[in-house]
Image (spheres, rainbow, N blue to C red):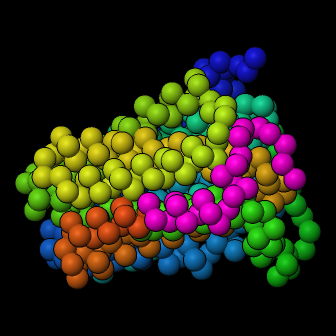
């Protein structure tokens, strides 16, 4: 029988990874709440909220094909630690600029771009680390626990960000800096069983090798593209400051609760999955939870009650974490270790596209049609994508178990 879930955290490398991810992700989302509220307070513009996502996304596009090969060639935990140090430096500058009164919207956008560049390297590197931290048989459980780290941080980070911003914006940014630097220390202490070992000369073929590999793997292509288009259309996170202030009538604390709500649902689901791994009908489950994600998004868009909005976002988060566990496990189990950095970089690009570019899309549509129509259109679009992908990728739909042998 598989080891019980707590055994995962008895692997010291994975435990260090787990706490590093909690710290870094909590800091990121704490900072995101503070930045979103500060930008909206300065400009009152839905488009500017969308631009935060676009500015963060653009560096990911430019650096993806460098970050992947780097993660395959060099020590992954060192790369992750350096990225977290950069994150901390950006948070420190936000603190100093806020205290000194010289931080402008343009300055915020510039620092957000640096954060995006650091995440372009950190995300694929951390993802590629996971399979080397535990025995192969524990990867699905490790994936669920890794997701729980992410969701725990997404609960603590936004809620703490809203509270600390209410005390003083500089306090929120300074706390983010401290968390980033703590994560950097933990990442530096990781000793992985497998690290980036490829040492072949860097060529165009090696830089773009991940694309060729993914194109030849319908399961991986289907999972990555499903997330890309479903979340690209269904993203509502960028508009939360509008819903918090203008529709639900709350302050920064309400925004923090809304930002944390998806993670509450996701954490509950990830803990459940860590103890009860998915066993059958994995493909059908994947498409089912994406459809549920779209429906929950539409309920949120129609809600004028804070508790109902939080419940809808929690449902959305629970559905999303099931999708994350399935997609991450399928990608990692079908990718050889010497390709994991490049494939994880492509995955990070797809996720970045869906999240940050989705934020921009939501901001543009909201500026044209209003926040509520933007969210409703996005939720409906997510459902349409799921139904279409069921027809385009029948192999993905028919997968029964995560651990089954596939060519």
Image location of residue 223, percent across then percent down: 64, 58
The front one of 33 and 249 is 249
The front one of 13 and 221 is 221
Image location of residue 399, percent across then percent down: 71, 46
Q: Is residue 283 left or right of residue 407?
A: left
Q: Residue at x 49, y 47 (%)?
A: 289
Q: Residue at x 23, y 70 (%)?
A: 373
Q: Is residue 101 left or right of residue 13?
A: left
Residue 103 occupies quadrant? bottom left
Residue 97 occupies quadrant? bottom left
Image location of residue 118, percent across then percent down: 54, 65
Image location of residue 280, percent across then percent down: 66, 34
Q: Eyeballing the image, is 221 above or below 172?
A: below
Q: Eyeballing the image, is 204 above or below 198?
A: below
Q: Which residues are magenta?
A: 383-407
The front one of 318 and 182 is 318
Q: Quadrant of the image for the N terminus?
A: top right
Q: Residue at x 33, y 50 (%)?
A: 296
Q: Residue furthest right?
A: 200
Q: Residue furthest left?
A: 249
Q: Is residue 166 visible?
A: no
Q: Is residue 81 visible?
A: yes
Q: Is residue 117 magenta?
A: no
| Image mark count | 0
Q: Is residue 399 magenta?
A: yes
Q: Residue furthest front?
A: 391
Q: Residue at x 77, y 41 (%)?
A: 132
Q: Is residue 153 left or right of residue 141?
A: left
């Amino acid at each position: 029988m598989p080891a019980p879930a707590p055994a995962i955290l008895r692997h010291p490398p994975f435990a260090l990874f787990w706490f590093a991810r909690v710290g870094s992700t909590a800091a990121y989302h704490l900072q995101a709440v503070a930045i979103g509220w500060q930008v909206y307070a300065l400009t009152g513009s839905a488009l500017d909220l969308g631009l935060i996502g676009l500015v963060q996304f653009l560096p990911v596009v430019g650096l993806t094909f460098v970050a992947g090969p780097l993660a395959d060639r060099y020590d992954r935990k060192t790369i992750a630690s350096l990225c977290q140090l950069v994150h901390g430096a950006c948070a420190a500058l936000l603190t100093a600029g806020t205290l000194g009164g010289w931080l402008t919207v343009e300055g915020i956008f510039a620092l957000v771009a640096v954060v995006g560049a650091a995440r372009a390297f950190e995300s694929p590197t951390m993802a590629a680390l996971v399979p080397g931290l535990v025995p192969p048989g524990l990867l699905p459980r490790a994936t669920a626990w890794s997701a729980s780290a992410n969701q725990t941080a997404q609960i603590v980070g936004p809620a703490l960000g809203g509270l600390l911003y209410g005390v003083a914006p500089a306090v929120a940014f300074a706390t983010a800096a401290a968390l980033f630097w703590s994560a950097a220390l933990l990442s530096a202490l990781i000793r992985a069983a497998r690290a980036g070992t490829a040492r072949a000369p860097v060529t165009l073929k090696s830089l773009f090798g991940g694309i060729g590999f993914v194109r030849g793997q319908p399961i991986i292509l289907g999972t990555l593209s499903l997330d890309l288009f479903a979340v690209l259309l269904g993203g509502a996170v960028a508009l939360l400051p509008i819903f918090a202030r203008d529709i639900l009538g709350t302050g920064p604390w309400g925004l923090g609760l809304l930002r944390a709500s998806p993670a509450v649902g996701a954490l509950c689901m990830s803990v459940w999955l860590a103890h009860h791994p998915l066993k059958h009908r994995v493909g059908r489950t994947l498409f089912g939870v994406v459809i549920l994600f779209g429906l929950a998004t539409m309920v949120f868009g129609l809600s004028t009650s804070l508790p109902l909005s939080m419940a809808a976002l929690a449902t959305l988060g629970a559905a999303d974490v099931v999708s994350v566990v399935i997609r991450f496990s399928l990608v990692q189990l079908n990718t050889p270790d010497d390709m994991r950095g490049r494939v994880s970089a492509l995955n990070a690009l797809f996720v970045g596209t869906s999240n940050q570019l989705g934020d921009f899309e939501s901001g543009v549509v909201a500026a044209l049609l209003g926040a509520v129509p933007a969210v409703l259109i996005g939720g409906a679009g997510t459902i349409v994508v799921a139904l279409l992908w069921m027809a385009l990728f029948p192999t993905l739909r028919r997968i029964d178990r995560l651990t089954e042998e596939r060519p």
